[in-house]
Image: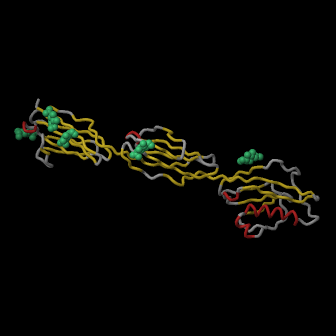
Amino acid sequence: MGVGGCLALPWRCLVVLCLRLLFLVPAGVPVRSGDATFPKAMDNVTVRQGESATLSSILYAGNDKWCLDPRVVLLANTKTQYSIQIQDVDVYDEGPYTCSVQTDNHPKTSRVHLIVQVSPKIIEISPDISINEGGNVSLTCLATGRPDPTITWRHISPKAVGFISEDEYLEITGITREQSGEYECSASNDVSAPVVQRVKVTVNYPPYISDAKSTGVPVGQKGILLCEASAVPSADFQWYKDDKRLAEGQKGLKVENKPFFSRLTFFNVSEQDYGNYTCVASNQLGNTNASMILYGE
Ligand SMILES: *[C@@H]1O[C@H](CO)[C@@H](O)[C@H](O)[C@H]1NC(C)=O
Ligand SMILES: *[C@@H]1O[C@H](CO)[C@@H](O)[C@H](O)[C@H]1NC(C)=O
Ligand SMILES: *[C@@H]1O[C@H](CO)[C@@H](O)[C@H](O)[C@H]1NC(C)=O
Ligand SMILES: *[C@@H]1O[C@H](CO)[C@@H](O)[C@H](O)[C@H]1NC(C)=O
Ligand SMILES: *[C@@H]1O[C@H](CO)[C@@H](O)[C@H](O)[C@H]1NC(C)=O
């Protein structure tokens, strides 16, 4: 294997490097293991991506560096025992490493298996979504890591419902308004803290008037009619007296529209103000109305 192979596959390079040493250790130069017995089972060395791996059970002889990968350095532990250190370890460094040395004509082999761990990372997640009530929602969260991360979905707001999917896919059929809010995808393995990302699910629904009460107010007093409605997107309000739409800026009258209610204020109620008022709440999904009476006391 040539130098080119070295650059592409550093771990293979190390194998070659070490195996070649078997033949290159000059006769008469004693190369011994600090511990004469090699472990029978292959040792695992686990290291996180970006850190350095020291393969200390590998024996090595001579100071010549055969590998062109600048991340590989030789560490002298004692006169006869060496380690190989791979700096800034990456996933392609994972694999078996074999080192052979010749001692008294008995070639000895040491083998370790380098395991590279990688923190979880979310690589793809569904964007925020707006959907009409009753529709189907499919959210995806893809993550990488070594070992493979565990992916979960949770519904976290407005009410924390908890885990709802132990999977990278979250399917909701016939979504309800209670299922709107923030969903959190979490990817975790043992390497580092879980990584999380959130998706906002907006569930649209037509207005629903929750409160509209008739009110009794004596002449000369201040009177208020309130119309409360929930809707997503929030409702637009209009007021009618009998069949006539109330004009904006009518004298002695104030209309306040907020996302969840509309308030009609009569600063000084007169006989002409008494009657049947209808509040109409609408958004692009539909409209509804409720009637209430302003009466004298
Ligand atoms: C090395 O790791 C593999 C899988 O990761 C495992 O099956 C094996 O038992 C480990 N060996 C040792 C000696 O720990
Ligand atoms: C939602 O999914 C259900 C079941 O898979 C299906 O019957 C229905 O047609 C879907 N609705 C829409 C709007 O796609
Ligand atoms: C309410 O209106 C009546 C009749 O127009 C008037 O006499 C009275 O002073 C007004 N009251 C107030 C508080 O403005
Ligand atoms: C008020 O008006 C609405 C709509 O015109 C009507 O349905 C309702 O019966 C009326 N209420 C009363 C008490 O007249
Ligand atoms: C109120 O709702 C009823 C029933 O949906 C509808 O017939 C009526 O036209 C509505 N009134 C107004 C003022 O929108």
208 or 158, nearer to the observer: 208
**Residue at left 71%, top 67%?**
7
The spot of residue 129 in percent (x, y) is 41, 50
The image quadrant where one finds ligand 2 is: top left
The spot of residue 233 in percent (x, y) is 32, 47
Where, by quadrant of the figure, is residue 58 drawn? bottom right
> Residue 224 vs residue 1: left or right?
left
The spot of residue 158 in percent (x, y) is 41, 41
Where, by quadrant of the figure, is residue 235 drawn? top left
Q: How is the image coloured?
A: secondary structure
59 or 210, nearer to the observer: 210
170 or 150, nearer to the observer: 170
Quarter occupied by the C terminus: top left
> Residue 1 vs residue 245: left or right?
right
For this orientation, the residue located farthest to the top is 297
Q: Does residue 260 show up?
A: yes
**Residue at left 28%, top 39%?**
208
The spot of residue 177 in percent (x, y) is 37, 41
> Residue 131 vs residue 47: left or right?
left
Q: Does residue 172 show up?
A: no
